[in-house]
Image (spheres, helix red, strand yellow):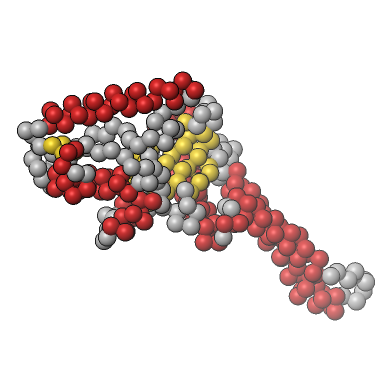
Amino acid sequence: MKKTHRMQRGLLSFLFIVFFLILWFFFSKLYPLILEQITIIQLPLVDSNIFLLPVGLLVVGLLISWSFHNKLWFGLCFSVPYYLMVKRIRRHIKDARFENEREFDNRPVKLPTIKIVFDDNHARKSGKVFIQNSIKFDKKLEDMRIDSALERYVSEVQYLSKDRNWYIFEFYAVDSQKHLEIKSADGLIAWSNKKTDNYTLRLDERATVPFHHMGLVGQTGSGKSFLIQMLVEQVLLKKVRHELFTIDPKRTDVHQMAKRTVGDDRIADKTNAIELIKQFHERMKKRQDELQDYFISNRNKTYKNAGLPA
């Protein structure tokens, strides 16, 4: 089996430790017996504990190196999973024969540097894998799907860093995609406020998006109306009083919710949708006039910078 540079260093360290432990055992257990048996010549006395010094130094050095590479300062519960995750990725890359290993070539395999950054070091539900790029590995890294090496995680997004020195694979835990259960309006408020401000909406455990155009597509019964209601509730809970215009041609749940929260003057069904769109258009023209003075002294800004409602 071909060895990597790290495996080679580990094997050498292990052999050194075994060698000095054998010397320690010999001089602590066997050498005194030899001294008793041989009286013709005076053999020197040897303190066997001296051979434990290089063993201790090697063990401490290996522990320090392991701690540094696996970020022990975040705790053992972080370092061990981190180590196992990196090790699994390295093994998969090695098994993929990135180096085009030759059967009778004894040179060790050189693998790219791998780093993992979690979004939350305690929960470890999502994060990024950084794999160092090089001319040798560039094409293979571009085509690589990393999911099989990320036990209990899935990666759907990969891209190059700005300096093109790293391939970045975003991942999330499979069990983090369980259906979210919110049992009250207060629960929704607390959940949405964790990751949003006055101009952003929280869609799920992973996605928080700014106010912008959105297309929502799904078959009947998939939950489109429920999601719209959840987003509207978030909008209404913002400290900035955003203005809502609601058109529901079928007068279903969204229409009834809007009647309770927005008011009849900004709700429309199929019959009066055109009138509400005209009202919305007039409000947009008025907003344009409101912002003119602000834009004169504030270049490349938006209504958000002005503190205005959407």
Q: Given the current orientation, which residue lies at the most extreme top position?
A: 296
Give the x, y percent position of residue 188: 31, 55
Q: As rendered, which of 309 and 182 lies closer to the eye?
A: 309
Q: Work out whether residue 15 can be spotted.
A: no
Q: Is residue 208 left or right of residue 133?
A: left
Q: Is residue 218 left or right of residue 106?
A: left
Above or below residue 168? Residue 227 is below
Instruction: Please give the name of the residue rendered at 16% of the width and 46% of the height, measured from the top-left corner.
Output: 259
Above or below residue 49? Residue 308 is above
Q: Is residue 184 left or right of residue 192?
A: left
Q: Given the current orientation, which residue lies at the most extreme bottom position?
A: 36
Give the x, y percent position of residue 81: 49, 56
Q: As rendered, which of 297 and 188 lies closer to the eye?
A: 297
Q: Is residue 139 left or right of residue 191?
A: right
Give the x, y percent position of residue 153: 38, 49
Instruction: Please give the name of the residue rendered at 13% of the width and 37% of the height, measured from the top-left corner.
Output: 268
Give the x, y percent position of residue 6: 59, 46
Instruction: Please give the name of the residue rendered at 10% of the width and 45% of the height, measured from the top-left corner.
Output: 252
Q: As rendered, which of 295 and 50 lies closer to the eye?
A: 295
Q: Quadrant of the C terminus?
A: top left
Instruction: Please give the name of the residue rendered at 50% of the width and 50% of the height, measured from the top-left corner.
Output: 87
Which quadrant would residue 245 be assigned to in this image? top left
